[in-house]
Image (tube, rainbow, N blue to C red):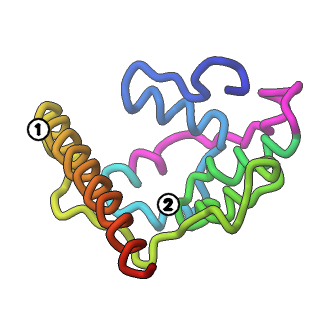
């Protein structure tokens, strides 16, 4: 949205990772320590040092608030990234933010199955079935509302 092109274009995952590191800079030791996959960690450690490129250099005409939010979202270490609630409340989004209208799940959302490993067609079917169930629940709730208002009158 800042330049109408991908921030980290890549022909394949390693190329994309190199684009990411070319902007975010080399990860710190603390960042590397959070990587579970030994091969991935070794690969990152084998790369030459790259300094972080300031977002303002890449997007000189962008709103500084947008760049601040971008910096907080695109942090290498997932433990240091901004959480959704804080991102929604960020100054860049203040005109859209209504804390009274930002529902937060009471418990972490967890899929019963690992969706990353499902074939595309199976995933499409699951989404379609969930959409049908959602519409049915909505209709049931709407039908129950007139009943409740008649009972309370």
Q: How many badges with numbers are in the image?
A: 2
Which one is closest to the eye, mark 2 or mark 1? Answer: 1
- Front residue of 99/50: it is 99
**Residue 136 horizontal/vertical position (percent):** 22, 52
- Front residue of 73/32: it is 73
Left of 91 or right of it: where is 34? left
Image quadrant for the C terminus?
bottom left
Residue at (72%, 42%) from the top-left corner?
51
Q: Which residues are magenta?
A: 42-63
Q: Which residue is mark 2?
A: 32
**Residue 141 horizontal/vertical position (percent):** 32, 62
Left of 150 or right of it: where is 47? right
Q: Secondary structure at mark 1?
A: helix
When the figure is inspected, residue 89 is found, relative to residue 23, above or below; the finding is below
Residue at (65%, 43%) from the top-left corner?
24
Looking at marks 2 and 1 on the same chain, the residue that comes earlier in the sequence is marked by 2
> Residue 124: which quarter of the image?
top left
Residue at (68%, 56%) from the top-left corner?
88
The residue carrying pointer 2 sits among few (fewer than 14), some (14 to 19) or many (20 or more) residues within 10 Å by Cα, namely: some
Residue 59 located within the stretch drawn in magenta: yes
When the figure is inspected, residue 7 is found, relative to residue 80, above or below; the finding is above
- Front residue of 48/97: it is 97
**Residue 97 horizontal/vertical position (percent):** 73, 55
Residue placed furthest toward the front: 153
Residue 61 located within the stretch drawn in magenta: yes
Q: Which residue is mark 1?
A: 122
**Residue 72 horizontal/vertical position (percent):** 69, 54
Residue at (55%, 61%) from the top-left corner?
31
- Front residue of 6/129: it is 129
Image quadrant for the N terminus?
top right
Alpha carbon distance from label 2 to label 1: 35 Å
């Amino acid at each position: 949205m800042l330049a109408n092109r991908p921030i980290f274009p890549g022909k394949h995952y390693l190329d994309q990772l190199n684009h990411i590191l070319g902007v975010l800079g080399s990860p710190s030791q603390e960042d590397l320590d959070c990587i579970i996959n030994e091969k991935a960690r070794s690969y990152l450690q084998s790369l030459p040092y790259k300094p972080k490129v300031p977002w303002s250099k890449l997007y000189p005409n962008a709103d500084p608030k947008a760049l601040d939010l971008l910096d907080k979202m695109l942090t290498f270490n997932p433990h240091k990234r901004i959480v959704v609630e804080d991102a929604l409340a960020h100054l860049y989004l203040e005109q859209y933010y209504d804390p009274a209208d930002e529902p937060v799940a009471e418990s972490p959302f967890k899929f019963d199955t690992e969706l990353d490993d499902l074939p595309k067609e199976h995933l499409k079917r699951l989404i379609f079935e969930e959409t049908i169930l959602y519409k049915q629940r909505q209709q049931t709730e709407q039908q129950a509302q007139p009943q409740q208002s008649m009972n309370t009158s």
